[in-house]
Amino acid sequence: MATNTVQKPTDQRALKTFVLWLGWAISSITIFAMMARQSNIIEFVQHDQTRVTWLILAMFLLGIMISFVHTIKLSSEWFSAYRIESQMRHKGLAGVNQTIAGDRLVDHFIQAMTTISARNGRIDVDALIDVEFASQHRLSQFVGFLGNLMITLGLIGTVLGMTITMNGLSGALGSLGVDQTLLVEGLRSAMNGMGIAFYTTLIGSVLGGILLRVFSWITDASVNGLQDLMLRTSIVHASADLEPSDEGNIRVLDASVQHLQGRVELLNMALQASREEMGMLREEAVKMHSELAELAANDPIRTMAAGHARYALSVRPSFMSRLFFRKRS
């Protein structure tokens, strides 16, 4: 008889990726708030004419959203992985309940292993895990790529700011002793260029080089841990299913028999329900027949028809004799 596996309270460790991500997000917000208050970053971003800092912040928000969605998906994957581990601990690969498999990668991994085992093939767990979880690694790497791109944009802003500074100083030196207004404008432009150089480097390196890279590391480490869990579960609890063997075939056959028993039980329940429905239908038919009989007994038209029938039967012999006499004559 098949046993149902209940989710254990210890499986709540599947939330460790989300808790780590949330903790780093809170720390990041605190660090950025302190940095913005001390260095007046918000005012600079509002008045940044180059829009480099705007592009850096937009890429940072995109990376945060992608990383958050990825973290939620990984948490769901961890819950499913612990469920599969608990089921495989008892009956191996054949003990996994495939009826509740969804669109998670670990479910696809188990389905692939089941398909290979059913075809009596050799299961290469390492290669299969790498293929199934490659998309998750690419997503984490994309977030890291955004962080590197933000650092590059910060360096571009630094070069752009230094260029503006050099142009401002050149104009100020050209106006020295000639026009005081142009001298002040040149110095103001040079200081603005220095601000662009320093602020873009600061924002790009902090948001991209530190914060976003850590988010990428958290999700990538979670994917690696998920792969390790599924690899260990497969090697330890499904070793008999990794190679074609009689034991593995027997376990698959046992799981098929249990599945068939479940179907037979459902069929018996359906037949029982059908018998009950047929009994109710028979009772309704008997009741309807008795009601129709009562209606027919009290129907005046039926009484009149019966009287006409009796009259027709009484006059039929004389009518037939007359008809026969006419034919003879």
Image: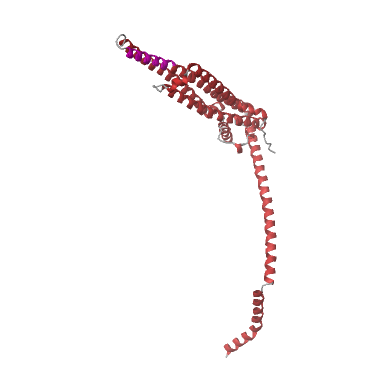
Q: Is residue 7 above or below residue 221?
A: below
Query: For this rendering, which residue is in front, 87 or 311?
Result: 311
Residue stretch rendered in magenta on the structure: 180-198
Q: Is residue 15 a member of the stretch shown in magenta?
A: no
Query: For this rendering, which residue is in front, 278 or 299?
Result: 299
Q: Residue 94: where, in percent of width, then height?
A: 63, 34
Residue for point 65% across, 77% down: 304
Q: Quadrant of the N terminus?
A: top right
Residue for point 68% across, 48% down: 269
Q: Residue 254: where, in percent of width, then height?
A: 66, 37
Single out the residue that lies furthest toward the left.
Answer: 178
Q: Is residue 193 a member of the stretch shown in magenta?
A: yes
Number of numbered discs on residues: 0
Single out the residue that lies furthest toward the bottom.
Answer: 329
Q: Is residue 100 above or below residue 146?
A: below
Dividing the picture into quadrants, the one containing residue 230 is: top right
Residue for point 65% across, 44% down: 263
Q: Is residue 209 above or below residue 124?
A: above
Q: Residue 51: where, in percent of width, then height?
A: 40, 23
Q: Quadrant of the C terminus?
A: bottom right
Q: Residue 152: where, in percent of width, then height?
A: 43, 19
Q: Is residue 100 above or below residue 74?
A: below
Single out the residue that lies furthest toward the top.
Answer: 177
Q: Main secondary structure of the magenta part?
A: helix
Residue for point 64% across, 76% down: 305
Name the side, left or right, on which 161 lies relative to 175. Answer: right
